[in-house]
Amino acid sequence: MNSKFFIFFVLIGVIITIVFLVFGQENKKSLETLKKDNIIKNANDIEIRNTKTDIFDKLNRGEDVTIVFLGDSTTEQNKYTNGKAGHVELINKALSHVYGDKVTVINAGVSGNTIIDMAKRLDSDVLRYKPDLVIINSGINDARKGVSMADFKTTYENIIKRIKNESDATIILRTSNVTLGEKINYMLREKINPIVKSISKEYDIGFIDLYSYYAKVIRNDPAGIDKYNYNRLHPNEIGQKVISDLILYSLLNPKQ
């Protein structure tokens, strides 16, 4: 090989290496800034477990990452946020600000869905994207529509088994927000949330107790739940910010 060509290719290789190193360092700096901006001071007593993922390692290496949020209307982007971003879009914006188009966030929330409905669309709305991270929430509609706790648990477990067997995704389960319906809140607190927690332990996957955090935020605010909820079931844009804050905090400050 001509020595000039050899030197040229060596220089190109050095330049590419430097670019990747600088890109990685800049991402890390921006990630640290994101962590500082997302410090939550009142979540120390909230159960957050197994939320460490490899998405940030992949992104810092310049790899693409796909995150899917599977849920109901409290996940879906809809009218209840008064034209503002819901928690999925807020998280998308925060991560995209650091990593640009390396991050793909899929909102797989569908209004009215129970865990039974989510299982039926797992292929089309989750697995086909080959996700790196899947965050799942179900509970409000299950309580409202009378899904049996046995069916809830079995179907939830089947979803987790399929994601584990058919993808390399990290899985994180989260509990629902507090509602204005005390019967639904009772079902969430006493029946559904304990099942979600036990499933996360049994399958050694992530768990974020959003319900307890949401309740704590409301208790500590004299304005009460009306400040955070659009109606009986749905968080407004302020409530959605509470959700995004806790999820981002859990991802950026992973708990074992």
Image (spheres, grey):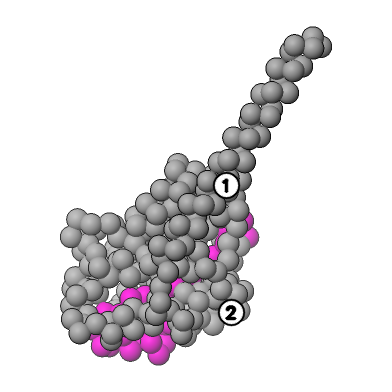
Q: Is residue 255 magenta?
A: no
Q: What residue type is labelled 2?
A: Lys
Horizontal arrangement in the rendering, residue 133 relative to residue 79 (left or right):
right
Report the Cα–Cα distance between label 2 and label 1.
35 Å
Quadrant showing the C terminus? bottom right
The earlier-in-sequence mark between 2 and 1 is 1
**Residue closer to the observer: 177 or 34:** 34
Residue placed farthest to the right in the image?
1
Q: What stretch is highlighted in magenta?
A: 165-193
Quadrant showing the N terminus? top right
- Which residue does the image show at 22% across and 62% down from the upper left? 81
Tell which tag, 2 or 1, sits nearer the viewer: 1
- Which residue does the image show at 44% across and 52% down from the upper left? 95
Q: Can residue 154 be seen in this view?
A: no
Say few, some or many: other residues with alpha carbon within 10 Å of mark 2 (under 14 / 14 to 19 / 20 or more): some
Q: Is residue 213 visible?
A: yes
- Residue underneath mark 1: 25
Residue at disc 1, secondary structure: helix
**Residue closer to the observer: 113 or 86:** 86
Residue 201 is marked as: 2
- Against 197, residue 38 (above or below) is above
Q: What residue type is labelled 1?
A: Gln
Q: Position of residue 137 (x, y in %)?
A: 41, 69
- Which residue does the image show at 18% across and 78% down from the upper left? 226
Residue 111's image quarter? bottom left
Horizontal arrangement in the rendering, residue 213 relative to residue 251 (left or right):
left
Label 2–label 1 contact, CB within 8 A? no
Say few, some or many: other residues with alpha carbon within 10 Å of mark 1 (under 14 / 14 to 19 / 20 or more): some
